[in-house]
Structure formats: structure tokens, C-alpha cells
Amino acid sequence: MSKPIVRFAPSPTGHIHIGNTRVALLNALFARREGGTFILRFDDTDLARSKQEYADSIETDLKWLGIPPDVTVRQSERFTLYDAAAERLKAMGRLYACYETPEELDFRRKRQLARGLPPIYDRAALKLTDEERAKLEAEGRKPHWRFRLDPTNVAWKDLVRGDCHVDCSSLSDPVLVREDGTYLYTLPSVVDDIELKITHVIRGEDHVTNTAVQIQIFEALGASIPTFAHHSLLITASGEGLSKRLGHLSVKGLRDAGLEPQAVASLAVLVGSAEAVRPIADLNDLAKLIDFSHISRAPAKFDESELEHLNARLIHEMPYETVRERLVALDAALGEAFWNAVRGNLTKVQDVAEWAKVVSGPVAPVIDDRSFIDAATEVLPEGPWDTTTWKAWTEAVKTKTGVKGKALFMPLRLALTGLDHGPELGNLLPLIGPERAKARLAGQAA
């Protein structure tokens, strides 16, 4: 296989959600694995709704996910290409002018349905004479332009869905150009795929029917047809479709919530596939797991609770060097031993600040049985302390007091940390150190 060229083509009309991100990741990681090119193409022909702030946000999201594009293009800067293609199609008779109003088209659809006929466009515009067209334009009507489909069965080999075909005689000729001269999605997308030499179109299964139309446009423009892969869509845990407009699971929201990009990527790529969903820390390793033939055709649920579980598992194995600079920003730069001691109790990296405070203080100790704590203090080992100190100390406390099990360990934990839960004290005690430990055992905030 020659090196693939793929594209992610969001509209900058809102923050991308996790469903969009699944498309971006599958494209980017497939290209990375095969040594190809990943293009970010902003579908911003809707100049009224497209905003630079959303384009900037999308680029920020992709960078955070670790998949910045190799090339970025904007459809708003490529209208001359679309105009030229439209003129070619007009000259061939494949793009033809239509003058019906939306109300007229709706009336015709209802009439066809009432007669038991499929509600497809009847190509009435092709029967208009020059005089009739002139009369309509004199009345102030401006044409929209439809692509004349060949009534054939269009077939292709889909990397996800296998053999696919669409009977184009069952489809209405699609409108490619609105009456105000602006383009709908279809023609610019095909023209860009041709001009950018896209080899693989990897996208959601909601575009399957579009594919037959686009293949006919590729052929009409004399271009080679890319390979298609239509993967299953993501839905929310409650079964709803994802919506950029409704703000479902936006990447920005997940990032702001403190989730790790690798956890987001792992779930977005692996859910709904034959691979077990698990945290993959390295995107190159995640790329190796992509197999389009192993993606289920059923919608896949993206569950935020599962994402948090993956996030925690990722952090529990996260090396110190990976997180060292972030600990500085969180005022928790207490060294590798500290990170290794507390990471197993974290769900998100920012939670480390709580344990940094437990180590460095001040902590208000919780002491219910003063006599027991006094007895424990009497046998507290002298420093320096290491990871064996806790076991040696608790054995000495058990010998002195006869107390064992939870009744032994919990009062010590509460006195030393102020909490009834947390990391293993064998690892935490040396970090707290003799001076702070003695102060807390004495009931002082330290």
C-alpha cells in the first residue's frame, strides 16, 4: 500500500465532541502507523456560522490529543476550485438548474407519497424549455443546482462494512449548489479529496449513502476513487446520539475536567471494536491496534464512568518523568518517591495536590484515643526512616498495647494524615518524616 493521505473535516461551528474525535483519531493514527499524511480540513463554507474561535479550539483539541495535523486547509480559501468543478459539471450536463421553491418540492413529495411512489425528485427541471427558464428568472427566481445521478448500482469495498452498494435510482438528484450560489457539503468535499489526493476516507457510517453520490461525482470529474471506511458511531451511555450543538462530551470539556488525553483516545478508538477496552499510554501502540475489519457495525456507547476508570488505570502506571513538570505546576513537586507512593490513589493527576498537603502539611490530626496514640508515640522509631519503618513501628505498637488489625492501623492513619483512607503508610511515613509525624501525634497541626 502506498502511503495514505487522510483527512479530518470538521465544521468550525462549535466544539468537537468525542464522536468527532473518534473520526480524527482513526484517521490520524492510521496515517501515523502507515507513514502517511494527516490533513485537517476545515469545512467552513458556511461563513455565517463558522467561527475562528472554534477553529482554534479544534486545533487545540487535536494537539492535546497528540495528533496535530501535518497539513491544515480551509474550504473558505478554495472556492475557485469548487467554482471550476461546478462549471465542468454544468458543461457535461451533470449539474442542472432547478427553480422549485421549498414549498413546491414539499407538495410534490407529499403527492408522490400519497400515490405510493418513492419521494424522490422527478427531474421536472430537465424538461423546462429555454423560454420557461427565462420566464422563471424574470419572475425573480434563482436556480439551485442538482447533480444528475446515473440510475446505476454503485458498489464499493468498505474497510469496515465489507461489500457495499447503493441503488442510485432510488435517490433524488442531490442539490450541490444553493440558489444563493453557496455550496452544500458534497461538491467541495469531493473536489478537496481530489485536489489533496486523499487515498482513504475514514468517517462515520452516517455518510454511507453519501458515498454513492460522491463516487459518481469522482467519476464525472475523471478522478480516482479513494478507499472508504465507515465506522460505527458513538452514542452516550444513555443511548443518545452525540451532538456538537448540545455540547455532548466535548473534548474541551473532557480536558477541562482533568482527564488524560491517552484515556480519551483509548476509549474513543477501542470501544465498539474486537479489542478489549484498556488504557494505552502510547499513541503509536494504540495505532497498531486499529483494524477496520474488527470494528462493530452497532453503535458504541461512550461511557464517562468507564472513561474515569481508564483514566485512573493510566495514572496508576504513569512514570514520574511523564508527570514531573505537571507536579511543579500543581505545587506537588515532592519527588519520584512521593509520586510512586500516591499515584495508585489518584483518579486524576490534579488530585495529587491533596496528598502533597498530607505530606507537607499542615494537617489537622484526628485523635480519638489519646492514651493509645501516646503509647504509640513512645515506641516511634528514631530517624532516618525508610519504607520498612511503618511495619517495624506497628509491630512495636501491637506488642506494647495488644491492639491489632484495623483498631491498630486506623487511629495511626487518622493521627498522621487526618483522613481514614489513602496510600500505603509504609510509603507515606518516610515522606511525612519524624518531625511532622511527632507533631501530629502530639495533636498539633503540622
Image: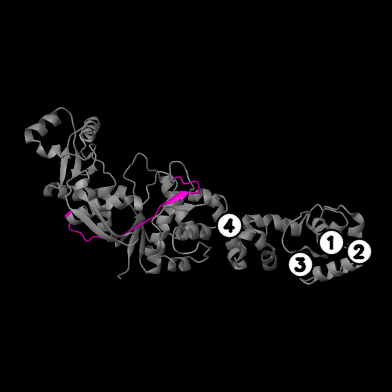
Q: Are marks 4 and 2 in contact (CB under 8 Å)?
A: no
Q: Nearer the viewer, residue 4 or 434?
A: 4
Q: Are marks 2 and 1 in contact (CB under 8 Å)?
A: yes
Few, some or many C-alpha atoms within 10 Å of disc 3 (few <14, some 14-19, many ≥20)?
Answer: some
* Disc with the residue nearer the chain's start (3 vs 2): 2
The residue segment tinted magenta is 220-240
Q: Nearer the viewer, mark 1 or mark 3?
A: 1
* Disc with the residue nearer the chain's start (2 vs 1): 2
Question: SS class of the residue under badge 3?
Answer: helix
Tell me the quarter of the image containing the C terminus. Answer: bottom right
* Disc with the residue nearer the chain's start (4 vs 1): 4
Q: Nearer the viewer, mark 3 or mark 2?
A: 2
40 on left or right of 286 = left
Question: SS class of the residue under badge 4?
Answer: helix
Q: CA distance from mark 2 to mark 1?
A: 9 Å
Residue farthest along the top direction in this orientation = 139
Residue farthest along the front direction in this orientation = 116
Mark sitting on residue 426: 3
122 on left or right of 77 = left
The residue that mark 1 highlights is 408
* Disc with the residue nearer the chain's start (4 vs 2): 4
Mark sitting on residue 309: 4
Q: CA distance from mark 4 to mark 2?
A: 40 Å
Q: Are marks 1 and 3 in contact (CB under 8 Å)?
A: no
The percent position of residue 348, horizontal first and vertical second, equals 61, 56
Question: SS class of the residue under badge 1?
Answer: helix
Question: SS class of the residue under badge 2?
Answer: helix
